[in-house]
Amino acid sequence: MSAVRVLVGTRKGAFVITADGARKNWDIQGPFFGGWELYHLKGSPVDPNRLYASQGSGWFGQLIQRSDDGGKTWEPMGNAFAYDGVPGTHEWYDGTPHPWEFKRVWHLEPSLTDPDVVYAGVEDAALFRTTDGAKSWHELPGLRNHGSGSTWTPGAGGLCVHTVILDPANPQRVFVAISAAGTFRSDDGGVNWKAINQGLRSNHIPDGTAEIGHCVHHVAQHRARPNVLFMQKHWDVMRSDDAGDNWVEVSGNLPTDFGFPIDIHAHEPDTIYVVPITSDSEHYPPDGKLRVYRSRTGGNEWEALINGLPQQDCYVNVLRDAMAVDTLDSCGIYVGTTGGQVYASPDGGDTWSAIARDLPPVLSVEVQTLTD
Amino acid sequence: MPAIRVVLPQHLRTLARVGADVLIDVDGPATVRSVLDAIESTYPVLRGTIRDHGTLKRRPFLRFFACEEDLSLLPPETPLPPPVVSGDEPFYVIGAIAGG
């Protein structure tokens, strides 16, 4: 018997939403950590009952929580994120040097092979790793010490590592994306890093070949085709067929190519999903209609998915980590909104329904596909 | 020396799994720093939530009060008022009234 467990991080706590494989009747548990911001929760691929959560607040700072029973109970773990050595400065909004200061964990990426190993993408931008189940965290300083680090500037949301991808075909390969520096790849387990932004074009950067300074919003990879990456950038949806070395725009007929999330169908590596929003000024869907867009051709040709999604007076957003897919035979797609709704489609996006309607603003959505 | 009564914000009580008042034994002179050291030693889960891990600087949205005085900006070695040392008055850790 299969089931799905949806892990939802919100501005005011975490929620665990479950259903059997039919995905018709949903049970909502929570809030866990009520009143705290939960930027991200994610389960271990090798031990689905091992969950990690990034809990934080402006008052009390960063906490990391761990569950060993699928989210029923949680234990606070290590929360010391100390940069390696003297961290130096990055560039501030006004162009002046600004000290590197830890603020929060945006994204937790558990290892594909070891439930005690987790990578944490943090603000100010750096990558940390635990090898003891989150008791302690250690920076992989090669990313921050990439020669360009002193020129990285924050986006509106801060200078953050928000995307961490562990390559299933190459244990030494890691991808990260940083707002607003760009995308980076390591081929030696996180020791050394290469900027992989060739082909990105950003209106705010006069140099059309600039390697650094692009506001990458999210990157997705399909496990069966790890050299193909899809990116939602501040503007433009992009595709790379060579592990990020080169990118081409695949925005095609999207109504707007601005947005935050991007994800890939579990069984169709050329079927991708985005949620366009009007612009970087408005941050809500065009025409008051929440539309997930699907391309079955790896980009360029897009169709609006609207069946079951609000099509009038809707002005919510879907943030970068608030889209996920399950791996059931009929792939499920999940999006969480800043209005507190979580929408699920059990049929690859053809039809949608709200599985939660009145949560706090949703920051992140992950889904686990569970089998007995 | 009597135990010092510490009143924590609600979220930190939940985190430390304690009630409204916490009784803290302090070795040596009772100062802001020694009380916070003792709190973190007794409840390690609170490390980093009141003070920064590395610098031990007070987190910006928290304040320390006792006997109707704001102790937040005093040197951490400042002795606590006698009624706090005697356990008659609590040492408050207060979250700023801010945010939504």
Image (cartoon, coloured by chain):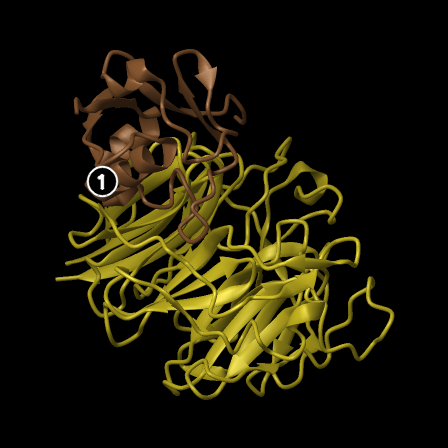
Chain colours: A yellow, B brown
Q: Residue at x 75, y 53 (%)?
A: A93
* Image side of residue A51 versus residue A94, left or right: left
Badge 1: how crowded within 10 Å, few (<14), some, or many (20+)? some
Q: Nearer the viewer, residue A104 or A233?
A: A104
Counting labels gives: 1
Q: Nearer the viewer, residue A131 or A348?
A: A131
Q: Residue at x 30, y 33 (%)?
A: B35
Task: Give the image location of residue A77, x and y in percent.
Answer: 26, 52
Is A238 situated above or below A331? below
Is A44 situated above or below B44? below
Q: Which residue is mark 1?
A: B43
Q: Secondary structure at mark 1?
A: loop
Task: Give the image location of residue A207, x and y in percent.
Answer: 85, 75
Residue A298 in sight: no
Q: In the figure, residue A135 lies in which quadrant?
A: bottom left
* Image side of residue A357 versus residue A291, left or right: left
Residue A277 in sight: yes
Task: Give the image location of residue A83, x and y in percent.
Answer: 47, 64
Q: Hey, what amino acid is under mark 1?
A: Tyr
Task: Give the image location of residue A31, x and y in percent.
Answer: 31, 34
Q: Residue furthest right?
A: A206
* Image side of residue A97 versus residue A224, left or right: right
For the N terminus of chain A, the image quarter is bottom left
Q: Residue furthest left?
A: A372
Q: Nearer the viewer, residue A75 or B58?
A: B58
Q: Chain of mark 1?
A: B
Q: Residue at x 71, y 44 (%)?
A: A286
Is A344 situated above or below A359? below
Is A204 situated above or below A289? below
For the C terminus of chain A, the image quarter is bottom left
Q: Nearer the viewer, residue A334 or B91?
A: B91
